[in-house]
Each structure stands twice: as C-alpha cells, then as structure tokens.
Amino acid sequence: MGSRSCRFYRPLLSAYLDGELSDEERQRLFAHLAICPDCQRRLQEYQSLRERLRRLPPTPPPPRQLQRQLWQRLAETEREQRRSHRFRLAVTTTALSVVIVLALVLSASIGLQRTQPPRILESRPAAGTTQRWPIYQPIEIVFSKPMNKESVTQNLRISPPGERERLPISWEGTKLIIGADSERRVALLPDTVYHIAILPNAEDRWGHRLGLTYTLTFRTSSAIVHAIETPGLTPVAPQPGPSLTPSAPAITESSPTPQTASTPVSSVPPPTPSPSSNSSQPSVSPPPAPQPAPTAVAVASPTPTPLPTPTPVPPTPAPEPTPTPALSPTPTTPEPIPVTGAFGRIYWADQAVQKKLGAPVSPALVVNAAELAFQRGLMVERFDTLTVYVLEATGTWKSVPEPAPVDPPLEFRSVEPNLWLPGGTFGQVWEALTLADSLGYATESEIHVMPTGARIQNFEQGTMIQSDRGFVYVLFDDGTWAQFPVTS
C-alpha cells in the first residue's frame, strides 16, 4: 500500500490497542491490515512494546529525606505565591480588561469595514499634482479596505490604451501597483500624459461597490526610457519622415464652428396687374339696351288695334361668394431626441457638459472610424465624413480633412522603445501640421481600426465620440475637449 494510505491508518493502531475504536473504524483497520504488511509489522511492534512495559519491575519509593525536602520547598513556594497573588490578580484583571477592549474594538472595526463601501485613500503620484512623475517609478493607488482584485482589474482604464496591456499589475495588501510585479519593473513612457480611471463598479471582498469614478491624470518626466524589459537596447534617434508629395492637396485646418440650420425662404406669388385705360387689349362693351318696337302705320281698311310695347326685364345679379376663413395649422411639439448609453450617463450627470453641448440635434449613430494614441493626445478619423480630429492633451482640438494618399504610404518607424513615428493618414497629418512638439510620438506601432465602429452624436454646440477602447471624447465647438471613461 502507499504511504499516504498508511499515514491515515497508523493513528488507528494505537487507538485499537487501547480499545477506543468504533466498530466501523475497527472493520476498516482490519481490511487495511489484511493487505498491508507494513502496518501489520508496526502493529506487532506496538503489541511487543506494550508487553515489555508491563513486565518492567515496580519503581522503589524515594528516600524519606528526599520526601521531607520536597515538602519544605512546596510549602515555601506556596507562601511566596500567596504574597504575590494579590498583585498578580490586579495585573491579570487589568490585562484581561485591555484584551477585551481591544477585541471589541477590533471586532467593531472588522464589522464596520465589512459594511462600509471602499474608498481610495491616496495615490502616487497624488491626484492634481503638476510635478513630472519619474518614468521608473510605478503607479500606486491605496484603497481603504481589501479589494476584489479581479473586479478592480476589470474596471481599470489606462490611457494611452496600449499601456493597459504593457504595464504589469500587482498588489501589496490594499495597494494597487501599476508598472511592477514580483518578477519585473517596466518603465513608463517618457514625457507622456497618462489617464488612470477606476470605474464605480469596482468591488471589495464583501461585494461593496466603489460607487464613484476615480480618475488620476499626470505627466511623466522627459528622461530617456530605461529599457528594463530589453536591456542593452539603444534608443534610435528620430529620423525625418517623407513629406507630402506636391501633387497631394494641402491639409487645411478647419476651426470648429457650430453649424446652424438654414432657414427656408417662403415663396410669395406676384400680385395680379390691374387693368388700365392704356391697355392695348380692346375693351368689352356692355350689351345694348332693348329698343321699343316701331308703331304700325294706319291704312284705309279697318283701323287695327296697336300692340303693347314689351318692357325689357333687367338681369338678376349673381350672388357674391362668401369668403371662407383659412384654417391655421395646429402647432405640434417635436419629440425630444434621446441621449442614452454612455453619452447619457455623462450628459445627464454633468450639468457643465450639458450646458456647453446644448441640446442634441440628431440621434446617435455608429460610423466606421480609426484611432491612434500619442504621448500627449490622440487622433480620431471618421470614414463617413473623411475628417481627422486632432485631440491634444492641453485640452484643445482641431479637425482637418483627410489628405490624399501618397505613394508609397508612410510607414511606422521606431524612434525609442515603445515610441514610433506615425504612419498612414495620421502620419501625413502629423507631418503636415508639425505636431511633434504638441502630440509627441505615437505610442502604438499601427493604427487601431475600430472593429465595431465609433458611436457619434451631434449637439448644438459640439459632438460626442465613443471609442471601443473604453473612453468617450466630448468635443466642444469652442475648441476644447474632455475625456471620460465608459462606466459600463
């Protein structure tokens, strides 16, 4: 039999010799002994040892002098114990009271901790700091209680988006560490604006939700990236990319201005000209009045009786038509345009956003779009209108038309670890508008084409764009923009 099975039955051998086994345990032990020679041999050793102990001679009594000395020491010890009994009793009572109070405080603290929702106590870097954060220093967020690690990870958003997969995540008690774990430490991107968001659905160990969205925005130092993941990698100096071909149309920057609906002009029929005396058309004369018939001439034969002259009957005038009053159209109230989903959670919860955007002018729709993240901002392109939006970390944005493609197309080129010269359409815009100082380099090596498209809704004074990477970009017509994490 295996040693694992024997370890289970060996404690039963001693209990069997002492007669402490139940019938069921005795039967199981006998079944095991029937097939296990090792346990049979051990049982025989126990029985032999027991017999030898029984055959040992009786122990002789101790000398009387030893007994007398032992009793004297016991009496002295008892007197000393009586003298210190009162002091020990007081100390013991005090210590017991302290222990009870501590136990009650700890129990109340644990109970309060289980019933209260979690909070974020602090972060490193601190929220609202303007100092540059060292690229070799991980990001730390401290919670008020133990958290459900999987829930926090699911509700964590990081921008630039590619950093969510590149940076390792670990825990030290209630502290969330982004950028380091037990095996490695990964440097942050240099001179880059980071947005960290923990959504309100993050839960603690007891299922209590955070309840509020926590956001942390900071900028890293401009030192050269320490290639911790790939030691020995030397940064490559940036190389100028190809410029736009002369045949390609220049990119014209368009300022964001609100669009106003054109007012329809109602057409008025021309007035009918009244007839004048100078008209060239002949006038129509009224019909001649009826004349009386001529009187008959008298002859020689009998004198005839003269006939009465007929009196003309005036024509009956036609009745004038009674004018019918025109019916005025009944005014109808237009149905409100809904703002729902991620847009609704931002629009209806933030009065400042609601005031700056104004009322919606059209329902939300999904369009094909692409996105590229940079050190200090991003670009978004709408394929339905062929428009490229340039969103800078300073809080300003601009839109430009999509440039004509160049041959050969611009390609992404690495300039530093995890930083690239942008390619494609975004690369053309980046070079044409000289955005290296404002946006920096691209933080990903290819353009992200949104598989499910971007959700867009237009308002009186701006536009909302929802990316499939978990963020909503609100573009105001005054040239400013804001970024919000999608909370579900």
Image (cartoon, rainbow, N blue to C red):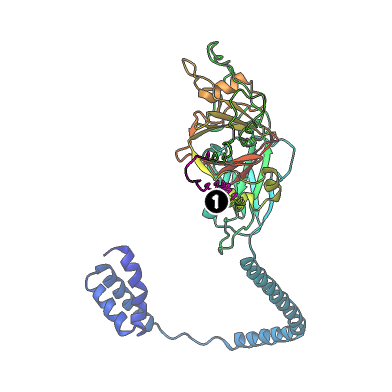
Q: What is the x, y in percent for residue 389? A: 59, 31
Magenta stretch: includes residue 318: yes
Classify residue 422 by image quadrant: top right
Closer to us: 243 or 416:
243
Specify whether 135 is left or right of 168.
right
Seen in the picture, residue 442 relative to 73 is either above or below; the reply is above
* Residue topped by disc 1: 341
Characterize the magenta stretch by its predominant secondary structure. Answer: loop
Q: Is residue 408 visible?
A: yes
How crowded pointer 1 is (Cα within 10 Å; few <14, some 14-19, many 20+) is rated as few
Q: What is the x, y in percent for residue 121? A: 69, 54
* Residue type, label 1: Gly
Closer to us: 107 or 50:
107
Magenta stretch: includes residue 56: no
Which portion, as a residue range, is magenta? 297-320
Seen in the picture, residue 356 relative to 421 is either above or below; the reply is below
Q: How many marks?
A: 1
Closer to us: 316 or 408:
316
Q: Residue at x 59, y 23 (%)?
A: 430
Element at badge 1? helix
Furthest residue to the top? 246
Q: What is the x, y in percent for residue 33? A: 25, 73
